[in-house]
Amino acid sequence: MNAWIEVDFDALRENLRSVRESMLPATPQVIGIVKANAYGHGAVAVAGELEKLGVDRLGVVWASEARVLREAGIRAPTLVLGHSFPEDAPSAVRDGLTLTVHSMEVAEALSREAMRLARGAKAHIKVDTGLHRFGLNAEDAIALAEAMREMPGVEVEALWTHMANADEEDDSFSEQQLERFTAVAERLAWIPVRHAGNSSTALRRPELRLSAVRMGLSLYGIAPSGFGPDPGLRPVLSLKARLARVMELGPGEGVSYGLTWKAAAKARVGLVPVGYGDGWKRQLAGMGEVLVGGRRCGMVGRVMMDHFVVDITSVDAQEGSEVVLLGAQGSEQVRADEVGARAGTIAWDVLASLQARLPRLYLREGKVVARS
Ligand SMILES: *Cc1c(COP(=O)(O)O)cnc(C)c1O
């Protein structure tokens, strides 16, 4: 393989355990978020592993993402967080998905299908408390919930919301959002489950753990922001490659499109077979560092679709030598949050960008147990 991803199932298990322990004595349900191909880790494999580890629920954004999990045989309760259309109702009922319902049309379609298939359908209702992404304002949420309470075949299982400033240093707006959410929840006391927190909110704000927490980045081993307590998470994903070519350059010779970087003196550079077509950010040109021979080496010149160039003048490396773009080599480590900062973006983006072209190896105790 030229380049590949390694997913450490042991780290995933430990992160789930750490997250649960850090929230004691509260014991909210953990909704393992596996949207966007499980943040690049591989949705089917990660969801299957989380199911085995006893996660309470899985969460995705689109019904289509949930259907892929069902087709792969994953049976864990699965919540669709995003917008659904009435046309999603038949497969949602058939596959036992939990839709977030935003309209009477979707609610009625669910009820109809549930009656037709003689199978109950569970639904969650989202309250927009200030993020203004989706969800219903307070009065509409209450009206929809009360209408659904009377509909045959559907059960409103949960009420939820999402924080706008969860990952900001100052997340005090969450207090106002909680107040607005609580006002709705008090009017709908018959709905049993409440959830409001992503990783950051759940770790920083015990009062927002409620009955369930939606954990994404923390399960993948990256502390979501530097602001909350760090429960000792371990990155789950490593991105590795092998040098495709090593070149000796004379002073003034350039590399990659536009020859934007030129060797100041005699230099050795290596060609890394990963590019923006794999999701490796083009903004890392001249900014990124990767590990070769156990040392940090700078990325030089433009990132191409399938390759970039690394300056290996100071290390001992040949064609075929291992390059670590994310993960550890020797005593050095490169993390997704560091790469995000260097690329002017965030860890979520760095991970979720990683494309299907990269083969994924799933490891337990250092041994490959599955591939995708
Ligand atoms: C993606 C997402 C999450 C998970 O967020 P993390 O910061 O990765 O834990 C939680 N809730 C919703 C609604 C999301 O879309």
Image (cartoon, helix red, strand yellow):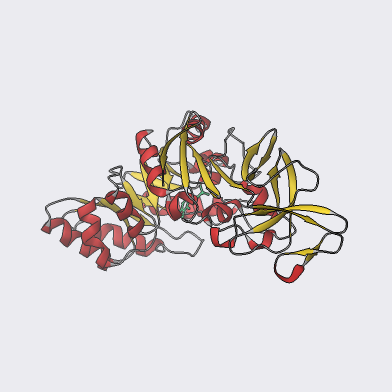
Q: Depth check: give the residue in front, 72 or 63.
A: 72
Q: Is residue 157 visible from the viewing direction of this image? A: no
Q: Position of residue 39 (x, y in %)?
A: 49, 51
Q: Is residue 324 visible from the viewing direction of this image? A: yes
Horizontal side, residue 191 vs residue 198: left or right: left
What is the residue that sits farthest to the bottom in this orientation? 258
Q: How many numbered callouts?
A: 0
Residue drawn at x 55%, y 51% as measured from the top left: 351
Q: Position of residue 210 (x, y in %)?
A: 44, 41
Q: Position of residue 310 (x, y in %)?
A: 72, 53
Residue drawn at x 27%, y 58% as measured from the top left: 146
Among the 4 quarters of the image, the one containing residue 227:
top right
Horizontal side, residue 11 vs residue 189: left or right: right
- From the viewer's perspective, is residue 350 above or below residue 15? below
Q: Position of residue 308 (x, y in %)?
A: 66, 58
- From the viewer's perspective, is residue 330 above or below residue 186? above
Horizontal side, residue 314 vs residue 99: left or right: right
